[in-house]
Image (cartoon, rainbow, N blue to C red):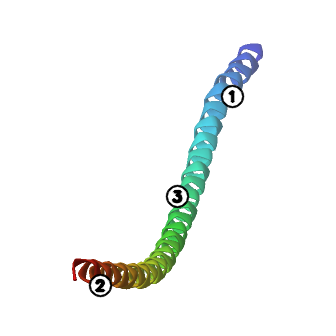
Amino acid sequence: MKKFWIAVVGAVLALGPAMFAQDVVTGVKDVSKDVAKGTKKAAKGTEKAVDKSADKTADATKDAAKDTAKGTDKAAKGTAKGTKKAADKTADATKDAAKKTADAVK
């Protein structure tokens, strides 16, 4: 009878590591699944954030381009007015110099 109990205890002790190993494998699987879910969720969040950021950047770029266009148009109009004034002054000065030269020649 003693040998029987030794065999039973030996069998139970032999099954312990195998059962523990099975629990470890199951635990690793569960952790792996949780990590995969977390990674997938984080990737989706990152994708949404990148899309939102790209949209904001596009809007800001569009607004900046409009502002630049307005500023360039305003500057061009100012340059045109300044050029016209300078041309008129040059024409007046040339006309006056021509009259003085004509008077001096007479």
Whichever of callouts 1 and 2 sits on the residue coming sooner in the sequence is: 1
Q: Quadrant of residue 19?
A: top right
> Regarding mark 3 in the picture, which secondary structure is present there?
helix
> Regarding mark 1 in the picture, which secondary structure is present there?
helix
The one nearer the camera, 84 or 93, is 93
| Kind of residue indicated by mark 3 | Ala
Q: Residues within 10 Å of mark 3 (few under 14, many from 20)?
A: few
List x then y, in percent, for residue 36: 54, 52
| Kind of residue indicated by mark 1 | Gly
Q: Which residue is mark 2?
A: 99
Residue 37, relative to residue 51: is it above or below? above
Q: Residue 43: which numbered mark, if any?
A: 3
Q: Residue at x 42, y 78 (%)?
A: 79
Q: Residue 16: which numbered mark, if any?
A: 1
Front: mark 2 or 3? 2
Q: Quadrant of residue 16?
A: top right
| Kind of residue indicated by mark 2 | Lys
The one nearer the camera, 49 or 14, is 49
> Regarding mark 2 in the picture, which secondary structure is present there?
helix
